[in-house]
Image: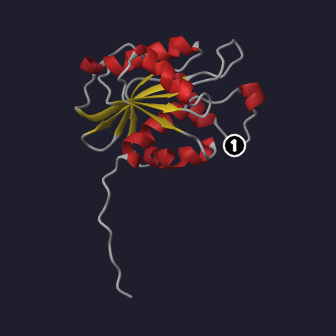
Amino acid sequence: MEPGSFGPGDLAAGPWKRVVVAVDPAVSCGEDSDETGICVVALGIDEHCYVLDDRSGRYSPSDWGRLVVSLYHSWHADRVIAEANNGGDLVQQLLRQFEPYLPERKVHASHSKLTRAEPVSALYEQGRVHHVGVFPELEEQMTTFTPDIDRATQGSPDWDALVWAILELVIRHRPKRAASWRVA
């Protein structure tokens, strides 16, 4: 199955508790620019994450903004998660040009890519994240990334969108546990 060749009605797994579209926008769109990471991920009733689509690529801001909003509608997503380190409020304003009432949340990277990806990596190791379809470029980046990667020659991997989506679904919206009291 090719990325983007199926839609919500074509999937065997489900129904979904939540679906999010995540975007990690690149600051430029030239031939040598980093890609804009765009992923669609669902949380299943089994509490596992399902990577439904990866549309990462080199886009102009208006093209990735239009694509993110289109994916939000076609996948009946609940929210858009947008990394705002490079662009801040401009990311939100761009998305709102295409969908004025878009439910989106800005996230800011304050740690390294490796640190952010660590809890998501653990979920993969536990068998709690599944890819619905084949995403060769995304999977290649995920499996070959090392902290000493030369970003000047190899660029920045665009799997951050995937990380933000899974963190939103599993970590951020996990039900709070009641505080336990210890008597010393």
Instruction: List the residue tagged with mark 1.
Output: 147
The amino acid sitting under disc 1 is: Pro
Q: Quadrant of the N terminus?
A: top left
Counting from the top left corner in percent of width and height, residue 65 is at: 49, 17
Q: Residue at x 61, y 21 (%)?
A: 35
- The residue lying furthest to the left in this view is 15
Q: Is residue 51 visible?
A: yes
> Is 162 located above or below residue 54 in the figure?
below
What colouring style does the render use? secondary structure
Near-viewer residue (33 or 44): 33
Mark 1 closeness class: few <14, some 14–19, many ≥20 residues within 10 Å: few
Q: Residue at x 68, y 19 (%)?
A: 33
Counting from the top left corner in percent of width and height, residue 107 is at: 51, 38
Q: Residue at x 63, y 35 (%)?
A: 144
SS at circle 1: loop
On screen, residue 167 versus residue 77, left or right, reads right
| Occupied quadrant, residue 100 | top left
Counting from the top left corner in percent of width and height, residue 154 is at: 72, 27
| Occupied quadrant, residue 84 | top right
Q: Residue at x 30, y 35 (%)?
A: 18
